[in-house]
Image (cartoon, rainbow, N blue to C red):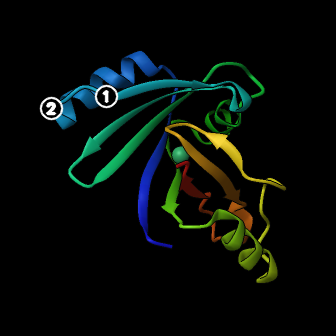
Amino acid sequence: MNKIEHIGIAVKNLDEANIVYSKIFNQQPYKTESVESEHVSTSFFKVGQSKFELLEATNSESAIAKFIEKKGEGIHHIAFDVDDIYVEMERLKKEGFIILNENPKKGADNKLVCFVHPKSANGVLIELCQEIK
Ligand code: ZN
């Protein structure tokens, strides 16, 4: 794994959260994007080398909706950049980690992504992401 690619924050209302974080970071999000397969709307900020993703559920089936229902708004996942997501998925599976999806999915911001279940990672939802070139 190369570095933390971004931190994902679950929010109830993306427009309102964009205003809050635009003030915190003193800049607008560089991108907003809906990911149909995940039932989320997202926005991205770039703070120096770091990225920050805000996620709002677009319906009640969304993992974000379930997360907010259980835990409220807050840090939802930490994403790590990898060179080859297939290799990393295989490696972690062999180590006994629960990978939430069989194959990498097309995520936001031009990435292939997969998730490691928080149950097998001390309560942290870990996202692996690989830039689609
Ligand atoms: Zn993410």
Q: Residue at coordinates 49% horizontally, 62% vertically from top-left? A: 81
Count the marks.
2
The three-letter code of the residue at mark 2 reads Asn
> Given contact means CB atoms under 8 Å apart, are the residues at marks 1 and 2 in contact?
no
In the depicted view, which residue is nearer to us: 68 or 57? 57
Label for residue 73? none
C-alpha span from label 1 to label 2? 10 Å
Label for residue 26? 2
Residue beneath disc 1: 29
In the depicted view, which residue is nearer to us: 63 or 109? 109
Q: Residue at coordinates 63% horizontally, 71% vertically from top-left? A: 122
Give coordinates of residue 119: x percent, y percent: 73, 65
Q: Residue at coordinates 55% horizontally, 48% vertically from top-left? A: 132
Q: Residue at coordinates 81% horizontally, 81% vertically from top-left? A: 94
The residue lying furthest to the top in this view is 15
The image quadrant that residue 16 belongs to is top left
Q: Relative to residue 126, is residue 110 depicted above or below?
A: above
Q: Is mark 1 on a helix, strand or loop?
A: loop
The answer to whether mark 2 is within 8 Å of ligand 1 is no
The residue lying furthest to the bottom in this view is 95
The three-letter code of the residue at mark 1 reads Pro
Q: Relative to residue 73, is residue 124 depicted above or below?
A: below
Give coordinates of residue 1: x percent, y percent: 51, 73
Local packing at callout 2 (Cα closer than 10 Å; few below 14, some 14-19, many 20+) is: few
Q: Relative to residue 104, is residue 58 depicted above or below?
A: above
Give coordinates of residue 42: x percent, y percent: 50, 29
The image quadrant that residue 63 belongs to is top right
Q: Is mark 2 on a helix, strand or loop?
A: loop
